[in-house]
Amino acid sequence: MYSYVARQPILDSKQKVVAYELLFRDGQSNSFPNIDPDKATSNILTNNHLTLGLDKITNGLPAYVNFHSDALVQHFPSFLSPDNIVIEILEDVQLTPELIDALTELKRKGYKLALDDHDFDARWQPILPLIDIIKVDVLALSIADIQCALATIEAKNITLLAEKVEDREQFEQLKQLGFTLFQGYFFAKPEMVKQRKVLTDKRNLISLIGETTQQKLNLPRITEIFASDPGLTYKLLRFINSAYYGLTQEISSLKHALVYIGEADLKRFISLLALSNLSQNKCTEITRLSLVRAKFCELLSEKQALQEEHQPKAFLTGLLSLVDGILDHDLEHVLEVLPLHVDIKSALLNQDNYLHQYLHLSQLVERGDWENASRFNIERGLPDECCFQSHQTALNWADSVLNRSSILL
């Protein structure tokens, strides 16, 4: 299954592309569907930024993204780097004190704010000092009306962006009026981009929503839910690997990730996923195999009585061992956007270490390559019976996890 987004270039006065506006699509039809604007924004973030990153869609240029009231009040833009995004405030938002406070905080953090389809109404006056860019629909107003309206804007540091420019004459006239950014069919129509979705089980998401409504979070239960869903785990790691968290942390286990993110941001992360409603699909075989590998690697680490910290690393290694297949992207590229511990990354890239040994043994057993599996066990002092019992236990555990999920709905 794929996610779809349209990108439309934004150009400067020399017709050089300097940014892209990202527009939500729910299929291959290049038109905006009948969908709540907050849900559309959440889909763009979860199905694109939390997959491989918006910069992959924009070729490293800034992305203009529409945000409605709820998404702004919940500080969803904070998960994106201020250098890579322009926050478009939709024209029908209500300027509540909560929204103004949220915009003030985003501005303080260095985000650029744009007013979308600006109508020059006086109601926008309270936030004009925060605004960097005003977008004007040049088909909705005549050139004369635009000229008069611009005279009412007192701020001198606001950039003017003309939307829906359709011919050269318009383009030249708007440049004379002080517009320096342009967007419209004269330059390019929105271009469709698709990429494979990271699927998460809706039942797990419902369980997480239930857990976050409790007064005190049950961290072991939440860890268990994430441990049963590679898609959720991947999105959690992508969420942590953002400008909001400094891009420096190496995650070694699920518990580490959940403690690091903190209760408030964990709830915000789950609400972002819930709002996008991205989980409509049942668990697939690739999910089951990921779970089997995760538990198998964890059990082997436990059997060998290595350092206690190795067990959660082993679990996470197995859980993410098929993430390239889930995303349909090269593994090296995927690992670039995940804040994983170096031992886990090395193992996933087939570099020999203790974690890769567990993973390799898991793959031998999966293929029924008993001869090489037995030789592998002998070299490491691991009894064959222990290995095969661990694999059977892992199979039973994965099936029980999926069966528990299946009766939630």
Image (cartoon, grey):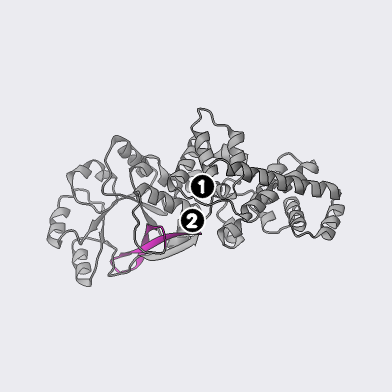
At a point 58% along the width and 41% down the height, the residue shown is 407
Mark 1 vs 2, N-terminal side: 2
Q: Specify start and end residues of the magenta stretch as a single range.
A: 1-27
Q: Which residue is mark 1?
A: 239
Question: What is the number of the mark on residue 53?
Answer: 2
Instruction: Say few, some or many: other residues with alpha carbon within 10 Å of mark 1 (under 14 / 14 to 19 / 20 or more).
Output: many
Where residue 202 sits in the image (x, y, percent)? Answer: 52, 46
Where residue 43 sits in the image (x, y, percent)? Answer: 43, 52
Secondary structure at numbered mark 2: loop
Q: Residue lying at the far top in this picture: please name it.
A: 215
Asked if residue 60 shows in the view, the reply is no
Give the CA separation, mark 1 to mark 2.
Answer: 10 Å
Determine whether, in the image, residue 18 is placed left or right of residue 270. left
Which amino acid does the dot numbered 2 rest on?
Answer: Gly
Whether residue 399 appears in magenta in the rendering, the answer is no
Where residue 149 sits in the image (x, y, percent)? Answer: 15, 53
Determine whether, in the image, residue 23 is placed left or right of residue 274. left
